[in-house]
Image (cartoon, grey):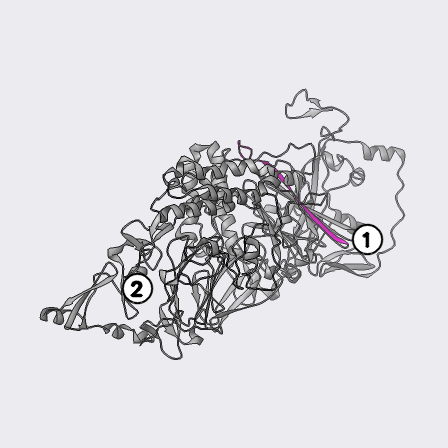
Amino acid sequence: LPSCTKTVTIRINGQEIKLKQNHDLVVNGKDITKIPYNVAGVDIRAVSSIFLQVELPNGVEVWWDGVTRVYIDLPGTFKQKTRGLCGTFNNNQKDDFLTPEDDIEPSVVPFANKWKTSETCNDVPEVLSNHPCDVNLHKKSTAEKHCSKLKSDLFKDCHWQVDPEQYYQDCLYDMCSCEYKVSKCLCPTISAYALECSRQGVNVDWRNDIRECGVHCPGGQKYQTCGNSCTRTCQDIALRPECKRECAEGCNCPEGEALDENGECIPIGQCKCQHEGIDYPAAYKEIRPGTKGLQLCTCLNALWHCKLATVQEIQEYPRANDLKAKCDASRNFEFTTCEDVEPVTCKNMHKNDHYSPAVCHSGCKCKEGYVLDTRNKRCVKPTDCPCQHGGRSYRENAIVQNDCNTCTCKNGKWSCTDRQCTAECSAWGDSHYKTFDGKSFDYQGQCDYVLAKGNLGTDSFDVTIQNVPCGTLGTSCSKSITIRITSGEENEIITLANDKTIPKLVTKAHVTVREKGLFVIVEAPDMGLVIHWDKGTRVYVKVNPKWKGKIKGLCGNYNDNEEDDFQTPSGGLSEVSAKIFGDSWRLQTYCPEALEVSDTCADRPDRKVWALKKCGILKTSLFAPCHSEVPLDAYFDRCVFDACACDQGGDCECLCTALAAYAQECNNRGAPVKWRSQHLCPIQCDERCAKYSPCISTCPQETCDNLLTNSKLTKNCGEDTCVEGCNPKPCPPDQVYLNDSYIDCVPRNTCKPICMELDGVTYYEGDLVEEDDCHSCYCSRGEKICKGQPCTTTEPTIFTTHQLEQVQQCVSGWTSWINQDRERIAKGNKKKKKLNDIEPLPTPLLLSTLENSSRCSIEQMADIECLTVDGKHPKDLDFDVECSLERGLVCKTTNSRRPCPDFKIKVLCSCELESCSVLTPNKEHPTDCHKFLQ
């Protein structure tokens, strides 16, 4: 089998240098990350983007490309003094296979086996093997096609200098053996031939013609087949004035330029010079002692040019070593003749290893007992070190949020809590999804889909999402979300939809629904499930870690591995295509398959400029505090996608949703951004009682209504990520808001919280629910608590057939006034005084007992009137009164000293209002075009 170069090891004078893949460098067992580097007279530097050069004190040079190629250049003094795989260097090729035992092997395999450095390695067997191109016939034509370029006109100028045949055969061998990309097997051989051509004086600019081997050059550099090995950096020029130029293939600065300390190409005339390890700017002049007197030395093209100084120059320019005085004592620096290679800093002070430099340079260092704060460029005591996070410095005891954990700055290091955080899946905008495991994808299906479905013992849930078109290009957006919670035998279903009114607070056995900020929040606290919906196209599903591995759907399988998130309902191997994966989670098989995601801006080029401009806000300083926390590119690209796609109205909604999705991710990372304004996606807050905030708690505001249930509502929200919205101003101490209007604050001890809702009537804590002479029931902490037993009921009334026909017969017109409280009192069932008054809609049976009264079913009631028994209209009273065909009359009060008055009602029966039957088709009404008959 073919083998590749993994490591080149150099041992000299007790030093060991290892050149590893990808230009990794290890010296004496320690990783070296900065070059140039010098150890015991061994210079290691980069001569181009491709080659590292190691120059030994004895003049030997080793060149390494970080992949497979290594070249060893020896001075003539080594003639007849070498052995090994590289031969004997004596102009006699017949003894190049000389072994350590001083015999000459006739063939390469036994020769190479004897030069193993580890006896434990197996010998390579000397067997005749087929050429790889004869074994892998399917690769032969591709190999010949690519390798023939060595013999093509591209290299014709070199063919007379270097025979390409051996390189061609090597190329075929590598290509037919290749198990990697073509570039990894083709380019090293062609590079080796091109380098040999350069050494023979023939430079071939070949990489532009062989695309597989193209090179990208950063920082203003250009690819050169024969770059100057001496002038790669300003430091090379300054420290190696006697350098011998050699060809160095790779990226280097253009002629006349070199890399500065920041890795940028600058004119060599702007390069700094060095003297006794101190850097001096270009054109710097100073006075130094010379053999014939004082000299004026000038920094020019990274080198010093010295001449005898005149009297005037001696007075005008500083003396050498004046830099010592420039070490800023106010920042706790002092001069040193041997500056550390890597100074002890706030960041690395906790490491055990701090290396001394191989070559000493003078400069400034921190005083004893201080370390370098690299961000503020000053020396501080270790206890004063700031912590770094997201490109910012934090002082001692500062706290930052990291998902559900908090990190505290302690002695320059972060000390973080280690709690298991909830996982979040999101769907937003025009078809964008991110799974619990963090896999992002786009899917443009228009159907009902399983977003997430979990099963854990007797508990289960499923969240389904309905997607509808939101553009002419096939893009889809979420219209509604349905959440089904099952615990044991109990089922609860919540549907959130754009066209459906959402109550501000709903409390069920296992689920609570509340509104906070811009979001409706559905929470099943005992199950560890929370859903956030922005009443638009954004939905976030958050689950407790106990659901790990128990979930499936568009949100993935939540197993911390995003690679297998595209599992279909049948399980098994994960799909590669988001389209196939998404289609598999349709709830209705008759829905069409999703469209492939296309470039919406290419389809709608007229919108691209506007989209780029508007989404460019994400790249401005407005969102800069979050850039280091949340990678921007994916959100910017999706913002542009949505801005181009939304062409059916709501352009700004699509844009604002994309911006808000990024902002919410910033909240998740503890970097909230106050990005909305009157000119950018504004939201209106009542300035009298609330202010806009990008980050408010999802916990419900405490009010009189929820005092009893608030502990349950806030069970898990303390760990939830904040959301943006209008934040109510806090009430004074010992006060809470009266209700969820968040306008009036009242003393906590005067609150009468909501206790329960029964048969459409809301009862407050302590309210009388029912009573007679024998028992009474009051509402307490969500339950009806009764004392005594109901009185024995009277004998049931037996109706005649004629009476039943009267009950069922509809008579149009207004009924008589009805006061059911008075009816009960008239029968001797005297009541204690009640705070509330309720007059439910009369039943047909009740109406049939009234004299000279119209009668009908509840469905045939067309209008209602409500008055107090003394004839006052509800709107003239200072009470909370509802008078409707849905609930009848309901009067509520929390003031025990001011109960509701006694009310009476009457209803209008309209016998033309008949119920519809699905079995009988509708037909037009003869007189009213707004009605239909059956």
Residue at the extreme bottom: 368
Cα–Cα gap, marks 2 and 1: 114 Å
Residue 611 lies left or right of residue 377; in this view the side is right
- Crowdedness of circle 2 by 10 Å Cα count: few (<14), some, many (20+)? some
What is the three-letter code of the residue carrying label 1?
Gly
Considering the numbered disc 2 on the image, is that residue within a helix, a strand or a loop? helix
Residue 693 lies left or right of residue 337; in this view the side is right
Residue 704 lies left or right of residue 909; in this view the side is left
Residue at the extreme top: 926
Please report the bounds of the magenta region as a residue range.
458-476
User: Residue 119: within the magenta?
Assistant: no
Residue 145 in percent (x, y) is at 50, 36
Task: Reply above or below: 764 against 355.
Answer: above
Precedes in sequence: disc 2 or disc 1:
2
Residue at the extreme left: 311
**Camera-side residue of 332 and 222:** 222
Q: Nearer the viewer, mark 2 or mark 1?
A: 2
Quarter of the image holding residue 427? top right
Dominant SS type (magenta): strand
- Crowdedness of circle 1 by 10 Å Cα count: few (<14), some, many (20+)? few
User: Residue 471: within the magenta?
Assistant: yes
Q: Quadrant of the C terminus?
A: top right
Query: Which residue is identified by label 1?
Result: 828
Considering the numbered disc 1 on the image, is that residue within a helix, a strand or a loop? loop
Task: Reply above or below: 220 against 210.
Answer: below
**Camera-side residue of 387 and 39:** 39
What is the three-letter code of the residue carrying label 2?
Leu
Residue 265 in percent (x, y) is at 32, 53
Residue 592 in percent (x, y) is at 64, 32
Residue 478 in percent (x, y) is at 59, 41
Query: Which residue is identified by label 2?
Result: 239
- Circles 2 and 1, Cβ within 8 Å, touching? The answer is no
